[in-house]
Amino acid sequence: MKSKRYRNRMFGIVTTLVLGSFFLVSVILPLISVMTNLKNADLRAIFSHPQTMPAILNSLKVTPVATVFSITLAFAAAWCVNRMGIRKRSIFDILLVVPMLVPSISHGTGLIILFGDNGIIKNQLGLNGSIYGFWGIVFGSMMYSFPIAYLMISDILRYEDSTPYEAAQTLGIPRKNRFFAITLPYLKKPMISVIFAVFTTIVTDYGVPLMVGGMYKTLPALMYEEAIHRMNYAKGSVFGLMLLLPAVIAFLFDLLSGKDRVGNTTVKPFGTDESKAKRIVACVILCIIVAAVLLPILSFIPVALSKNYPLDKSFSLSQFSYVMGSKNGLEYLSHSLFVSVAVALVGTLFAMLCAYMTARNASPSLRILHLLSITSLAIPGIVLGLAYVLFFKASFIYGTFAIIILVNIVHFFASPYLMIYNSLRKLPPELEAVGATLGIGKVRLLRDVIIPQTAGTLCEMFAYFFINSMMTISAISFLTNYKTEMFSLMLPQFDASQTSLAPPAIVAIIILFANLIMKGIIGLLKSKLRRPESR
């Protein structure tokens, strides 16, 4: 028994040390290297440059407008799905998050296909004006961030208890007063977190501005040009720390504000007592929103299947041959699939171990480990990529697949970690004590009890790592070479050339198809895992 306790204690110590060392090398030291690199920057010259202040102001103008539009649209969709009693709401849940499965730069490509100089909708309706500039970035950013806002708001609404509303209805309180007295106080703090999350997503993105910004430069796009094209890492470090600021503020606010909503299994869901007319109106609104967010993605299909869009719209697969053959797309796709699977496997394992230590044990060192595990929420991908260049450029992993796998694990670590952390917190706290009494070690307890109980969450974690690794372009833009080129990085290459819209459309379609296949596989696995429980 003593030897079993000793092994359990050593398991905890060794795992904590390994995970702590991992975060030290992969997060803390790279960020320190960005800060120390400021000594090489001429701050006066940087801020007096004619592009710097306009780019900062442009980001501050675009981001609030796009944030308001995104959250408003997402709130309307989430309310219709969760409060109006519509049928088949799972279909809308799937359709409304499809834009998450393609890179942000692809939304800009879709806008150009629809509203560019030869845009499909622009020509059909005879519209004037240009999609490039302020409004192009606003609409592209809105579509890119909409699924994030929708998922967060839908989660808030889905777990609200209907009992107070029923009591208010019994007391004869009008529906309008119920909204202001019950709904708004409930939504207040969670919605602030949504606002920060969407704002941070938009202000740190360079994909949409790179595609539809034109001469309207934003700070992330300017950082991309300086760090990637001009290799000016000192200037990039200054811009990177500026982009880090709003993300850190959002992170600290969410951390210090605490959680108003505590998981409760007795929550009573809302009924479906809305009238048929209201349900029809809700369905119409949802169909309009689905069309708005999916149309830019659907526009890839006619362009990809045309011989030479828009000059020759006859059906042809020649563009697929060009992308996958002449431009080495097949090789780059294999790289992306390999990296995504590796990131999903290693990331899921690390996140599971880390969450097991922090959720099932209590100590000051483990609280620090928990904070380190969620720090990636506060680090934009473009900043993380620059940090890895500065810290790892003299190391043996620089220029290999290993550094790409590492940066993706760190970049996307926080969300899967929180998924499994919350699942582990729901398990009975006596499991470890019972296991110790029976002489069961922690490794065996993990293998035989905890992992089977959280298998569905582990599947979702795997899918999250895979999907985001397939479509990311931010952090890895700094770290690839001709031997390790990723499929998603063909998007900025094609968009930079502006020779044809078909190649970036094809890349986006293939990434979307790969991610949909993964979502389908994970869905089947989860259904098989649930089947024994239902028997």
Image: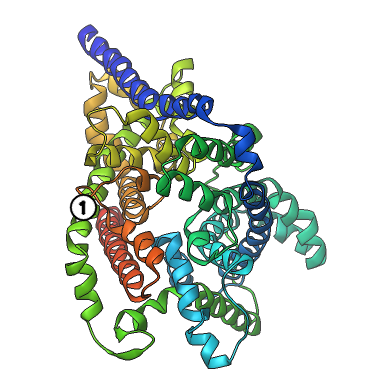
Tell me which residue sits at (53%, 76%) in the image: 292
Colour scheme of the picture: rainbow
Q: Quadrant of the C terminus?
A: bottom left
Q: Position of residue 155 (x, y in %)?
A: 54, 55
| 384 over 128 or under it: above or below | above
Number of marks drawn: 1
Residue 43 locus on image (x, y percent): 61, 33
Q: Amino acid at mark 1?
A: His
Vertical relation: 372 (above or below) 68: above
Nearer to us in this view, 160 or 281: 281
Q: In the rendered image, which quarter is residue 392 located in?
A: top left
341 and 500: which one is in front? 500
Q: Position of residue 355 (x, y in %)?
A: 39, 32
Question: Does residue 426 appear anywhere in the picture?
Answer: no
Q: Which residue is mark 1?
A: 335
- Give the class, few, some or many, for how many residues have Cα within 10 Å of label 1's Cα (few <14, many ≥20): some
**Residue 397 sits in quarter:** top left
Task: Identify which residue is drawn at 22% across, 29% down.
Answer: 396
Quadrant of the image containing the N terminus: top left
Q: How far from the left and from the top, in percent, is residue 425?
A: 44, 34
Relative to residue 454, is residue 165 drawn left or right? right
Compared with residue 203, is residue 29 higher up or lower down, i.e. above or below? above
Residue 391 visible to the viewer: yes
Residue 361 or residue 139, whichever sits in front: 139
Question: Regarding mark 1 in the picture, which secondary structure is present there?
Answer: helix
Report whether 454 appears left or right of 380: left
